[in-house]
Image (tube, rainbow, N blue to C red):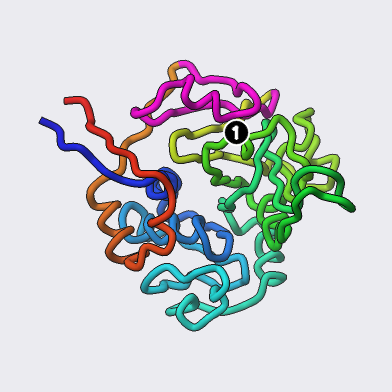
Amino acid sequence: MSETINFTTTESLLINVANLIENNKYYWVAIGGSPMMAMMLARKTLAPRAYYVVEDGTICPDPLEYVPFLSGASGAAEYRAVAWKDMNTVGFHCAMGYYDYGILDCLQVDMYGNINSTFIGGSYEHPERRFGGPGGANEIASMCWQTIFMADQEKRKYPRRVDFISSPGYLDGSPRARERAGLPANTGPYRVVSEIAMFGFDEETHMMKLLAIAPWVTLDDLLVEMDFEPLIADPLEKLPPPTEQQLTVLRAEIDPGGRVLGQGTWIEYKPED
């Protein structure tokens, strides 16, 4: 008889992204936050030979545990790094085609994979709410060969079109829209990952396409948390649930204080026999 698994929505999101990370590939990862935690989990479990640089220019550190964003540029965050460069240097490396994937967290992501981290509502001059902006996310989304986006499955985070394009996806979705904007050819969004879903993008229309869904939710549960209806793959795959090893590594090694993992909603899931 299968045993019930208990985990949070935050843990599920991190594990879904970690499952995408591949050995012998090169990643440019947003500083602090969920992208770093997903990379740390992958390197401790499924992909120990995945190589990465941090948004601030640190090359392949191996921190003992998660370091919060505001202390990202610290000795603890740079532990055992190959080198500590800067964002411009890493950006030049990325422009030369060295990084296979970027990984970014999102405030909003729309049907064409554009992301917003600048403001919501109103206008640029008079927003309803302003945020910190993209930092190095624009360079990551512009120049990595493929980009993975992370966003909780909430309707406000999946609008039809973002209020402001802080970092480019497929722009208006038209053929060669990225190239016309001056971005490198054959680059763009690869996956959008939430705690209950995995999306890709249609090769012709560049619209977001649902590829897989968590086994503990229905398609209706998912669609009510989106402002647009994505294309849906046939067949629609099921995401694997978290494993005991992944949950143990997250809780005991990466975030033993529960600063991030303590957030989110608890899920109780019993796999079918």
Whether 214 is drawn above or below 71: the answer is above
Q: Is residue 163 magenta?
A: no
Q: Residue furthest right?
A: 125
Secondary structure beneath label 1: helix
Kindly indicate the quadrant of the structure image that contains residue 169: top right
Query: Residue drawn 37% across and 57% down?
Result: 41
Whether 94 is drawn above or below 6: the answer is below
Range of residues picked out in magenta: 205-234
Q: Amino acid at mark 1?
A: Lys
Q: Residues within 10 Å of mark 1 (few under 14, many from 20)?
A: some
Spot occupied by residue 154 in the image (x, y as percentages of width and height): 56, 37
Kindly indicate the quadrant of the structure image that contains residue 146: top right
Whether 235 is drawn above or below 81: the answer is above
Quadrant location of the N terminus in the rendered image: top left
Residue linked to disc 1: 155
Query: Residue drawn 70% across and 30% down?
Result: 160
Task: Classify residue 207 as left or right of residue 128.
Answer: left
Is any atom of residue 266 visible in this view? yes
Q: Is residue 214 magenta?
A: yes
Task: Classify residue 180 as left or right of residue 23.
Answer: right
Spot occupied by residue 193 in the image (x, y as percentages of width and height): 51, 40
Q: Residue furthest front?
A: 128
Q: Residue furthest top?
A: 234
Is any atom of residue 20 visible in this view? no
Spot occupied by residue 239 in the image (x, y as percentages of width and height): 37, 33
Quadrant location of the C terminus in the rendered image: top left
Q: Nearer the viewer, residue 131 or 89?
A: 131
